[in-house]
Amino acid sequence: MNQNARMFGVALLILTLIVAVILGFMVEPASPLTWILVAILVVIPFIHRKLAARHYVVWKDEYSVGLDSIDQQHKKLLGLINQLQTAVDYSTGEEFEREALDELVDYTKTHFTYEEGLMEQNDYPDFVPHKAQHEAMIKKVEEVLAEYEKDHDTAMRNAADYLKEWLINHINGTDKQYSSYLIGKGVK
């Protein structure tokens, strides 16, 4: 089910509950059914918030690579991915979606350049394969951007899902491998 249909369904459910509560109060204000419907109506935003939060990535200390500059960049990348997720979840419009995606891609390239510069300056032995991972990720994102021209909703969902998974796996995998090497070289 696409995002618009889901949001329409939730809005319809809320509207139906509001009408049922109003009718319930008009017919019999003390009815337990009326108060149960009020409780359901009150709980819906909390449930929605909990379900929506599952789509977002929250920084955890276990993601730290031990280099503050890199950790700060990774945190910013997660924030930009979450911004993209907001565009996906709330159908914010093509302009916001495009800006979110462009900002994320631009910052990702900036981060990769910085990270690769540190590795190269310190003669990191696995620099070439690490850089190849970065290039593969950028290529995949460019494919998603091409897909965006054909189907906005699917492309945005795919981009957000791919980037969340890729970044967390990359941080916890190869980034942690180079960080111990760079820390050993005195990089902070």
Image: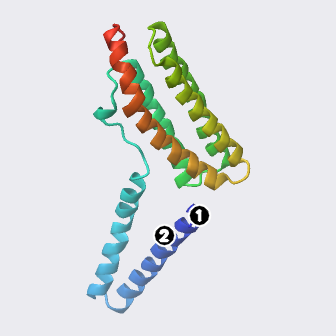
Residue appearing at x 61%, y 39% in the figure = 140
Q: Position of residue 142 (x, y in %)?
A: 66, 37
Q: Which of marks 1 and 2 is nearer the N terminus?
A: 1
What distance separates the C-alpha of mark 1 from that of mark 2?
10 Å
| Within-10-Å neighbours for mark 2: few <14, some 14–19, many 20+ | some
Number of marks in picture: 2
Q: Where is residue 139 in the image (x, y as percent from the top left)?
A: 63, 35
Residue appearing at x 56%, y 52% in the figure = 157
Towards the viewer: 76 or 19: 76
**For residue 29, above or below residue 79:** below
Q: Which mark is residue 155?
A: none
**For residue 35, above or below residue 53:** below
| Within-10-Å neighbours for mark 1: few <14, some 14–19, many 20+ | few
Q: Which mark is residue 4?
A: 1
Residue appearing at x 35%, y 85% in the figure = 25
User: In the picture provided, is 7 more to the left or to the right than 183?
Assistant: right
Q: Label 2 sits on what residue type?
A: Val
Residue appearing at x 54%, y 23% in the figure = 131
Q: Position of residue 134 (x, y in %)?
A: 54, 28
Mark 1, secondary structure of its residue? helix
Q: Which mark is residue 10?
A: 2
Q: Position of residue 99 (x, y in %)?
A: 63, 38
**For residue 9, above or below residue 67:** below
Residue 16 visible at all:
yes
Mark 2, secondary structure of its residue? helix
Residue 30 visible at all:
no
